[in-house]
Amino acid sequence: MNGVHFVAGTPNAYIHKPGLLASAGEWMARYGKRALIVTGSKSWAAAGETLARSLTESGVTYELAFYRGECSYGEVARLQSLVDPQAELIVGVGAGKVIDTAKKLSNDIGKPLVTIPTLSATCAPVTNLSVMYTDEGVYVDFPVFYRNALLTLVDTDVLAKAPVRYLVAGIGDTIAKWYESVACSAGKPANLPTIGGVQAAKLCYDTLIRHSRTAIEDAKAGRSSEALQLVIDAVILFSGLVGGLGEDNCRSAAAHAVHNGLTALPDSHRAYHGEKVAYGILVQLMLENRPAAEIDELIGFYKDIGLPTKLADMGIGRRLSEEELDAVVKVALSPEGTMGNMPFEVTADMVLDAIRRVEERGQNL
């Protein structure tokens, strides 16, 4: 951000309650009556019927644009050609990549954004950035925008019915905020937004350690419980608040950089974003030479809720070639990534050694 501490902490409005989708049209109609909805087929199947009825009842007309599976520059350009000039709102309905695609589109064409998550897997609905990939799913960069979503609508009933693995992945993505914010903020100006971002990250960590097990059990039963609502707010709202307040002073570091590196492996595309980030946390802790007891405690939490502790847990059970490892490290250390937010220089050899130690510990435990 060119040395300027730019704060875009939250959407203009964040609304979260069970059954909210039935009144989504009333909220959206306050801001516009014509919308382009960017969504995926599974996302629309989960939310479309209730949302469409609510929009019709509130006099909001809409067109659907189904995205093709990756948040890429080419996909955003394709969608841009579909936008009616009379559209007043861009609406992202779905998971992280759907919403990031809608977010990039809305910023490119200068139209307000509404986000409606159908999974609690990332903080994408409330962050002022989009993580961009190639059409093949390899990480490219993450442009940061100078405005945030106009409206974020979170219906716990919808999220409670989603596959539980996404919730677990969201917990992994959010746990990372604590470790990464501490690393990012080391040696940075201790302004209040940065302090607030780190404290938001600690609140996420404490909430997830305390409530994740119950929330997962409730999600398995499809219950929109208090524990699940707390975890959802940690994963979506407060996770996004970390970077929204602290910006690069506490947004992401080695954990997300390792996630980016893993996208160079086609095998890893079967693993979810938060699963790869969770593995990246272990690599970051190895880079930081954290005490073995601290790492083992986190691994125990991972095993308890179902997060990966080794590459094999993400479907990468074979021995990686030197060329593959080089590709992982190259992307992980990309200047367009977040490894540079670590408080010390990280080399390729350090990353390879940390991955090796994570693998050894995962096998031993």
Image: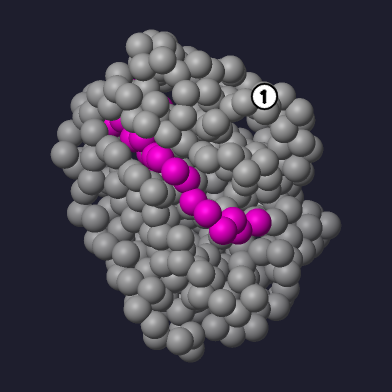
Q: Which residues are magenta?
A: 143-168
Is any atom of residue 287 visible in this view?
A: no
Residue at 45% x, 87% y is: 189
Question: Up-down: is 73 above or below 47?
Answer: below
- Residue closest to the eye, 295 or 166: 166
The three-letter code of the residue at mark 1 reads Asp
Q: Quadrant of residue 155?
A: top left
Tell me the quarter of the image containing the C terminus: bottom left
Left or right of 217: which side holds 314? right
Q: How is the image coloured?
A: one colour
Q: Quadrant of residue 241?
A: bottom left
Q: How many residues crowd around disc 1 within 10 Å: few (fewer than 14), some, or many (20 or more)?
A: few
Location of residue 7 in the rendering, given as x and y in whole percent from the top left corner:
46, 66
Please say whether residue 145 is one of the residues in the magenta stretch.
yes
Which of 18 and 153 lies nearest the eye of the viewer? 153
Rendered-image quadrant of the N terminus? bottom right
Q: Which residue is mark 1?
A: 84
Left or right: 295 as drawn, with respect to 6: left
